[in-house]
């Protein structure tokens, strides 16, 4: 599920947008009135989407976007002349006056894109640092010497223990080395 933060300078506007989204089956995680509050929620949730007006109580939407991580999408609802100023800065714009159908379709599209990116990021192979690689190599070497395993067998053994115990491969290697 995508975390959605609605932030407008006026709380009535934010609640109105939240109500529209909720009535259409879209869960809203937080509603706020300032960029600082939105950034606090963004730090807590780590990924998601921010639906915002152009001007907030403490900053404008471009400043908010610049302070967000790349794991957040941003949708700005503002007059057409303002939307043309913010496009190209990682912000998707919806011109006011707003049609509910356009908002729901745009949010749905953005949620699908966010989920696709999250899945792609999750499937990407983890990059280990040299220290972690050295720990795994020492653990494999210990298994090879003590149990007469091949390197492949030692690696599979570490992987199996890692999955069985629901810990990372590096932690499994560290435990093995500590027990020896």
Image: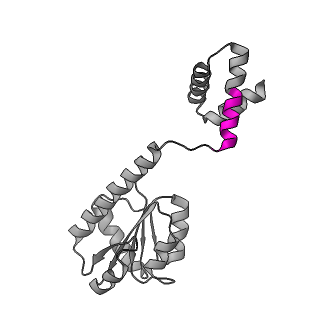
Coordinates of residue 75 in the picture (x, y in percent): 36, 70
Q: Quadrant of residue 164?
A: top right
- Residue shown at 27% from the left, 61% from the top: 24
Q: Nearer the viewer, residue 143 or 32?
A: 143
Q: Is residue 143 above or below residue 78?
A: above
Q: Is residue 124 above or below residue 68?
A: above
Q: Nearer the viewer, residue 117 or 23?
A: 117
Q: Extreme top residue here?
A: 148
Q: Nearer the viewer, residue 92 or 16?
A: 92
> Where is the C terminus found, in terms of image quarters?
top right
Coordinates of residue 61 in the picture (x, y in percent): 43, 78
Which region is colored magenta?
A: 129-139
User: Is 130 part of what is drawn in magenta?
Assistant: yes
Colour pattern of the rendering = one colour
Magenta highlight: main SS: helix
- Residue shown at 33% from the left, 59% from the top: 26
User: Is 104 part of what is drawn in magenta?
Assistant: no
- Residue shown at 65% from the left, 36% from the top: 170
Q: Quadrant of residue 151?
A: top right
- Residue shown at 48% from the left, 84% from the top: 57
Counting the numbered discs, the total is 0
Indicate left or right for 105 with 59 as reference. left
Coordinates of residue 73 in the picture (x, y in percent): 40, 65
Q: Is residue 22 above or below residue 1?
A: below
């Amino acid at each position: 599920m995508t975390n959605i933060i609605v932030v407008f300078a006026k709380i009535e506007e934010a609640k109105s947008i939240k109500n529209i989204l909720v009535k259409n089956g879209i869960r809203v995680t937080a509603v706020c009135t300032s960029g600082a509050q939105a950034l606090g929620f963004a730090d807590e949730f780590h990924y998601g989407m921010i639906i915002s007006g152009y001007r907030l109580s403490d900053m404008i939407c471009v400043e908010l976007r610049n302070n967000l991580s790349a794991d957040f999408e941003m949708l700005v609802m503002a007059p057409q002349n303002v939307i043309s100023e913010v496009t190209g800065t990682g912000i998707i714009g919806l011109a006011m006056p707003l049609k509910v159908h356009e908002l729901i379709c745009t949010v749905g599209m953005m949620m699908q894109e966010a989920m696709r990116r999250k899945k792609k990021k999750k499937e990407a192979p983890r990059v280990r640092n040299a220290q972690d690689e050295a720990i795994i190599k020492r653990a494999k070497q210990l298994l090879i010497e003590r149990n007469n395993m091949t390197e492949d067998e030692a690696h599979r053994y570490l992987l199996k223990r890692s999955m069985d115990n629901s810990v990372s491969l590096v932690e499994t290697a560290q435990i093995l080395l500590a027990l020896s």
